[in-house]
Image (cartoon, rainbow, N blue to C red):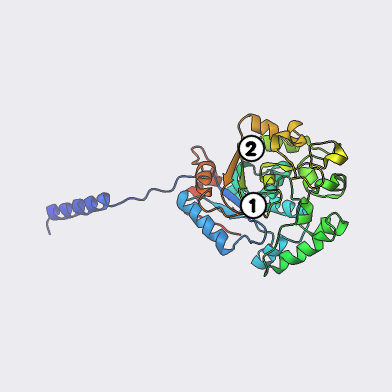
Amino acid sequence: MTLLSVTLGLLLAASYVLSGPVRLPDPPRRPLVIWHGLGDSYGSPGMLEFMSWIKEMHPGIFIHSVYLDEDLKEDERAGFFGHVNEQIRTASEQLANITELQGGFDAIGFSQGGQFLRAYVERYNTPPIHNLITFGSQHMGVSDIPLCRPWDLFCQLARRAARGGVYTEWAQENLVQAQYFRDPDQLDVYLERNTFLPDINGEVAGARNASYARRLAALNALVLVLFSADKTVVPKESSWFGSYAPPSNETGAVGAAVGEEKTIVPMRLQPLYRHDWIGLRTLDERGGVVLETCEGEHMQIHDCWRPLVQRYVGEVLEHHGDAYGAAGEQEVLKVQ
């Protein structure tokens, strides 16, 4: 074989290689954290499928699903039974120990996972959330305990116990839904005994925390999604910081008298908004609060999530540190 033939052979081989497809590494993106809702777990088939759809939309994105127990059934149970303040503290420690999240992340909260992530923002937010999307969350609580599917034993046990006394000491330390139950007919009792929601909503005079307002107002965007036919969240407007007004015959407010249709107090008329107790008004006035609607019942998101996740999740990071480098150069889906 002559030198000329060897050279020609190498040139042909190089030409073939260079003409073939070249896969560039995925760009580094802001990571994502998801907190599931009631009756679900961090690694359920539905959660895994949803995360796979996001990976198709944003190739290379790092996703972490918050868990309160590595056992899927116990993680589901923790959505009904436990002390919410302790659960949020556990989640904050979990997120603080994930290397890929240290530069900050976007977050999605499904149902009660939404107000839990908001509580994380207000109380901890290290590492910080950039954009927070909440689907059907109960930001102003619920005025009725959610109905249960016939076969859902955890839900039925929790509902039966909660209806027996949502503001008892035991319920406030052990029943998750009781800790965001806001009874407009017993607001004084709610403010005195509820251990979770009044705090993150700044409703207790003399106990408001200015750092909560500062951290929430620092979000880039808070996207609040309401389900148009939601019968699980009562009232459904809680997803937009709406609530039932207290009875007018007791307070002189705009509430409904007996037998009349209940009045909804919208977000911008809430005391927590008007007085900016948690930074919501500050965030809204600079355009950071986005109100969206999904048609259908509770958590029937269909495809309405797609434009929101496209816009508010997975931004390509032009300037990034080592924490993003590894995730940007490989496909990563982390479910813990």
Residue most extreme to the front:
259
Q: Nearer the viewer, residue 216 or 239?
A: 239
Q: Nearer the viewer, residue 260 or 13?
A: 260
The image quarter containing residue 216 is top right
Res. 329 visible in picture: no
Per the rendering, the mark at residue 230 is 1
- Crowd band around label 2 with a 10 angstrom C-alpha radius: few (<14), some (14–19), many (20+): many
- Crowd band around label 1 with a 10 angstrom C-alpha radius: few (<14), some (14–19), many (20+): many
| Image point (64%, 37%), residue name | 219
Q: Position of residue 82 (x, y in %)?
A: 77, 59
Q: Nearer the viewer, residue 186 or 308?
A: 186
Residue matched to label 2: 219
Secondary structure, mark 1, is loop
Q: Position of residue 249 (x, y in %)?
A: 86, 40
Is 304 located above or below residue 249 in the figure? below
Q: Count the marks: how many? A: 2
Amino acid identity at mark 2: Leu
Q: Is residue 6 left or right of residue 240?
A: left
Q: Is residue 210 left or right of residue 134?
A: right
| Image point (19%, 53%), residue name | 12
Res. 156 visible in picture: yes
The image quarter containing residue 273 is top right
Earlier along the polypeptide chain: callout 1 or callout 2? 2
Secondary structure, mark 2, is loop
- Locate the C terminus and report the quarter of the image it occupies: bottom right
Q: Is residue 47 left or right of residue 170?
A: left
| Image point (62%, 29%), residue name | 286
The image quarter containing residue 156 is bottom right
Amino acid identity at mark 1: Asp
